[in-house]
Image: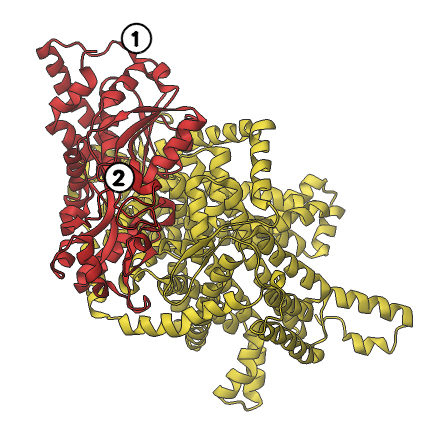
Chain colours: A yellow, B red
């Protein structure tokens, strides 16, 4: 489908009045037409340049240069000194008052506490079924071999022997490396969080689809929830739901719902109208229409949503441990603090395996098509269920004779942690990074940070709003300006700039390394698949683990934090590049090959330009990942928003924490808005939509 | 967490305990004084080993006398708010240096009880591992440290020594370096793990390092080391600029050498679980005890519940005094 023609062309045929109206709309929503952008960009750069150059000559009034704020002034030798904080607008205090008013005076806490208690009961029951104990029904733990046969059969029934082996192997991994009880706790937690997230997501998605007003009000909230650093909203969760295992489940649900809502909505909106018409003509009631026609037609997107929910939940396993979620995540965190890195890696792989299995099972289940026409006898139709029951029964019987099939002995003591420890120690001793660190810190990073801090805040605002104006018109300009204004008024400008400098530099490295890596991988089908597999693995591997070896290599400084961010944020840069190139329609390939292009020409003239919008979305994701990781990297010891968020978390300073979280979220949303807008327009111009 | 195992061990220990009770003729606390045995006593566990293991030991002891116990993982700062509202029941390790602020704030707001002080004293201070002390004569004296400042320099520290402090939220002296005129700068690690990573990296490369550390801690057993000896702490040092070496500034002294280690409880605990609260007030850790626990877990690599059970097995006299001391 081609987009509407260029406004300049239309102008010749439309009456005067309509021209001005359509021009207004264009100005509001579209930004400058592409051929005028270069000129616009030059003008913008000139204005910003003048603003910056004016500063050394004292031509910028103070109120446009520095904001009163909470900051650390730092110079090259890092003499740190705190300046008293003044908020221009008491945003933090207002938020804090609102939240406590909601909780204590409007008694929202009665509802939230009730929710939290019921959730706890639910988690207890599931946990009891999986691993016994006193809570829940007080059942005895099932033999581990029963779980093994369930994983094997499920995998085989849904997909085949590969998935079957992966599932079985994962169960064995838990058992052999002494992670059984922790893994069962995590599994119980996921078994509650995932379905609840899916149900809430589906419900909200359908609601958004039915009522435009709901969509308009919910979507921005989802955007903020997705970009808000986890630690910032953990404070709010603690205040409303208390602490404990169930609170971790709640935090996970909040994090996992947004993609489900979005994908449900997308799925429903992209159903072709003919299908809905057909349903209506068949005399469906609106409920029948929803459940029999619309939801099944949106199945694909909903399944991607479910898959995303599972991935998000697993990503939260470690983070939720900060507010009391038990299981693999807590175990990992504790080992990390005792510096048992080898064991951390061991647990990290357990989480990755769990993700791969759940992902594989859910995808296989989604792809499985029921054969409606087959009229099979009972035992053939239910052959796998029967097989499952028989195997589980056998497992129970065997387990009662052979204790080793019932419970893995605790003193098994099999581990490969030591070899990882040895590897990490070897690396730390043999990779001398002192000179490298010196160059990076003294000649690149510190000047970059100081430059951002030196820039008058008005210059940065003009720059961002100007880019918004060029790409998306007044709407984008006002939106991005609003985001930045919030940060400025909340009094966190300097810290936000330090966070921004780390994100920018990390993104730069990810682009320089990740995109070429993606290009190289995409050249061969097999390589591309391997690359995507590693992307999946790294994405679910708990990001905390990167931090400690990074400190051991580079010690406590900004560079270390940046390296940890790069390790995490590289994934989308590679993934989207590979996908972008793979998804180029084969006809185009044929066409350029016939036109006699060589490999190089094909890459430069076809592949890169066509895949560019998708690659840019990858860059956008990289920036989002970098924003979320840079906050976690406060564990290294950075002096930015992340450090303040951790401080707020340990003080349970609700208002401050949420304000800081919003600052991070708004910076991320600014980038997101601009990049997505550009990519969408680009795709339209290329005729890819 | 390995409930079955804990249970069997519990039964074992309960057996020994019963025998012990019978032989000495001391009857256990009566059921009436126990209070609500069905509702669980919730013990928060944090992220350092001695606290987790000790919490499990106390939990197992409370289970012996008939209580139901649950453990929940929490942040060590946020726990005081949870104590106030009764989300958790008790806290076994309130370190003066790190948690006094949060603890006192909670006491002011109400809802929390000070359940007494352990014998164990805590110290939180600049700390040098043995492999660093060997590099510079006169350590761990602070003036010797200052003289060797160059040894502690980093690429980006401009020739000054670097002291790796804990996270800013641990609320330390930010002025001491300036007050004592030291040739050092202070950087903040983001958490305990970052501190240990610094130590481990320095140890692997045999470089000098001075970090924030506390005692009792597992690093003693792992690296050996000593606290830097600053001018001794004095109350007036914090408030009176004229006191001490620097006549113009406060903070020209070290941290208190014997900080307290307290216990805290939710204020509903004495009513709901009277016997447990009595036991809590009598519970008394010594420095050695905390160190042993940390050893069990961090050096011998035992699971927390196992370490707790082993400690209970080996220290019957200690805990029976907590549980059964005559009033």
Same chain for the residues under marks 1 and 2 in the image: yes
Which mark's residue is nearer the viewer, 1 or 2? 2
User: Tag 2, which chain?
Assistant: B
Q: Residue at x 20, y 50 (%)?
A: B228
Identify whether B246 is placed above or below A79.
above
Q: Nearer the viewer, residue A526 or A315?
A: A315
Q: Residues within 10 Å of mark 2 (few under 14, many from 20)?
A: some
Residue of label 2: B234
Q: Is residue B84 above or below residue A351?
A: above
The secondary structure type at the circle numbered 2 is loop
**How many labels sit on residues?**
2
Where's residue A68, x and y in %? Answer: 56, 55
Quarter the C terminus of chain A occupies: bottom right
User: Residue at horizontal 42%, vertical 24%?
Assistant: B111
Report how far apart the C-alphas of labels 1 and 2 lie in the structure.
48 Å
Q: Is residue B171 above or below residue A244?
A: below
Q: Which residue is mark 1?
A: B32
């Amino acid at each position: 489908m081609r987009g509407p023609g260029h406004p300049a062309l239309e102008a010749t045929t439309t009456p005067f009045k309509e021209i001005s109206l359509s021009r207004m709309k264009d100005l509001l929503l579209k930004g400058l037409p592409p051929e005028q952008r270069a000129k616009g960009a030059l003008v913008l750069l000139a204005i910003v340049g003048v603003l910056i150059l004016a500063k050394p000559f004292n031509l910028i009034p103070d109120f446009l240069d520095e904001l009163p704020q909470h900051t650390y002034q730092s110079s090259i030798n890092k003499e740190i000194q705190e300046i008293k904080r003044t908020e221009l607008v008491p945003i933090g205090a207002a938020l804090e008052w609102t939240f406590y008013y909601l909780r204590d005076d409007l008694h929202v806490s009665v509802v939230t506490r009730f929710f939290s208690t019921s959730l706890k009961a639910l988690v207890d029951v599931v946990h009891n079924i999986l691993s016994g104990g006193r809570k829940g029904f007080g059942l005895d733990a099932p033999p581990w071999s029963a779980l093994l046969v369930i994983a094997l059969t499920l995998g085989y029934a849904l997909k085949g022997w590969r998935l079957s082996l992966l599932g079985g192997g994962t169960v064995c991994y838990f058992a052999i490396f002494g992670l059984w009880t922790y893994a069962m706790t995590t599994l119980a937690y996921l078994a509650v969080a995932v379905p609840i997230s899916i149900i809430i997501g589906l419900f909200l998605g359908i609601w958004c689809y039915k009522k435009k007003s709901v969509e308009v009000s919910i979507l921005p909230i989802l955007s903020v929830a997705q970009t808000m650093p986890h630690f910032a909203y953990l404070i709010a969760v603690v205040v409303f739901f208390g602490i404990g295992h169930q609170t971790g489940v709640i935090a996970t649900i909040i994090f996992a719902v947004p993609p489900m809502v979005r994908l449900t909505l997308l799925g429903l909106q992209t159903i072709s109208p003919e299908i809905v018409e057909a349903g209506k003509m068949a005399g469906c009631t609106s409920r029948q229409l929803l459940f029999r026609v619309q939801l099944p037609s949106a199945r694909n997107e909903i399944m991607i949503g479910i898959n995303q929910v599972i991935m998000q939940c697993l990503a939260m396993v470690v983070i939720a441990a900060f507010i009391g979620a038990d299981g693999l995540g807590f175990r990992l965190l504790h080992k990390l603090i005792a510096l048992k890195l080898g064991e951390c890696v061991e647990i990290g792989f357990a989480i990755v395996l769990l993700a791969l299995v759940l992902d594989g099972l859910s995808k296989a289940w989604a792809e499985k098509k029921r054969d409606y026409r087959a009229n099979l006898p009972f035992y053939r139709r239910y052959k796998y269920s029967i097989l499952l029951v028989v195997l589980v029964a056998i497992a129970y019987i065997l387990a009662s004779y052979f204790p080793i099939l019932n419970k893995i002995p605790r003193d098994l003591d099999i581990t490969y942690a030591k070899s990882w420890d040895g590897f990490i120690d070897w690396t730390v001793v043999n990779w001398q990074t002192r000179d490298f660190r010196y160059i990076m810190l003294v000649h690149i990073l510190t000047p970059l940070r100081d430059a951002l801090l030196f820039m008058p805040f008005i210059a940065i605002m003009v720059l961002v709003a100007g880019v918004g104006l060029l790409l998306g018109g007044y709407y984008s300009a006002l939106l991005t300006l609003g985001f930045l204004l919030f940060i400025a008024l909340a009094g966190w400008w300097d810290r936000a700039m330090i966070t921004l400098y780390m994100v920018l530099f990390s993104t730069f490295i990810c682009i320089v390394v990740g995109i070429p890596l993606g290009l190289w991988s995409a050249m061969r089908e097999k390589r591309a698949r391997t690359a995507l597999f590693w992307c999946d693995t790294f994405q679910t591997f708990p990001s905390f683990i990167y931090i400690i070896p990074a400190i051991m290599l580079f010690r406590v400084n900004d560079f270390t934090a940046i390296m940890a961010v790069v390790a995490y944020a590289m994934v989308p840069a590679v993934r989207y590049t590979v996908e972008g190139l793979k998804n180029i329609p084969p006809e185009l390939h044929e066409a350029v090959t016939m036109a006699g292009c060589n490999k190089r020409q094909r890459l430069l003239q076809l592949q890169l330009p066509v895949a560019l919008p998708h690659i840019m979305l990858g860059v956008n994701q990289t920036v989002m990942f970098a924003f979320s990781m840079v906050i976690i990297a406060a564990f290294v010891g950075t002096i930015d928003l992340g450090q303040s968020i951790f401080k707020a978390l340990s003080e349970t300073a609700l208002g401050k924490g949420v304000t800081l979280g919003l600052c991070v979220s708004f910076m991320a949303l600014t980038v997101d808005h601009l990049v997505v807008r550009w990519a969408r327009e680009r795709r339209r111009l290329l005729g890819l939509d | 967490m390995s409930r079955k195992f804990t249970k069997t061990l519990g039964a074992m220990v309960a057996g020994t305990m019963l025998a012990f009770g019978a032989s000495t003729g001391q009857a256990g606390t009566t059921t009436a004084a126990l209070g609500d045995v069905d509702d669980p006593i919730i013990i928060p566990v944090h992220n350092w080993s001695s606290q987790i293991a000790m919490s499990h030991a106390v939990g197992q002891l409370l289970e012996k006398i008939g209580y139901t116990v649950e453990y929940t993982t929490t942040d060590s700062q946020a726990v005081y708010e949870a104590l106030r509202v009764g989300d958790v029941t008790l806290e076994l390790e309130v370190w003066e240096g790190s948690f006094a602020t949060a603890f006192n704030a909670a006491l002011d707001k109400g809802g929390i009880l000070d359940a007494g002080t352990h014998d164990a004293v805590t110290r939180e201070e600049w700390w040098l591992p043995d492999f660093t002390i060997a590099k510079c004569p006169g350590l761990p004296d602070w003036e010797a440290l200052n003289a060797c400042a160059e040894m502690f320099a980093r690429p980006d520290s401009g020739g000054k020594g670097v002291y790796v402090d804990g996270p800013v939220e641990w609320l330390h002296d930010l002025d001491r370096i300036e007050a004592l005129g030291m040739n050092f700068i202070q950087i903040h690690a983001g958490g305990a793990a970052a501190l240990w990573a610094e130590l481990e990296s320095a140890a692997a490369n045999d470089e000098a390092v001075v970090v924030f550390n506390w005692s009792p801690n597992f690093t003693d057993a792992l690296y050996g080391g000593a606290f830097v000896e600053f001018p001794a702490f004095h109350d007036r040092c914090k408030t009176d600029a004229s006191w001490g070496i620097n006549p113009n500034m406060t903070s020209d002294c070290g941290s208190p050498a014997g900080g307290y280690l307290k216990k805290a409880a939710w204020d509903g605990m004495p009513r709901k679980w009277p016997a447990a609260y009595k036991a809590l007030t009598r519970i008394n850790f010594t420095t050695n005890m905390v160190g042993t626990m940390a050893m069990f877990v961090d050096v011998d690599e035992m699971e927390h519940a196992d370490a707790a059970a082993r400690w209970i097995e080996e220290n019957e006299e200690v805990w029976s005094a907590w549980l059964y001391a005559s009033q």
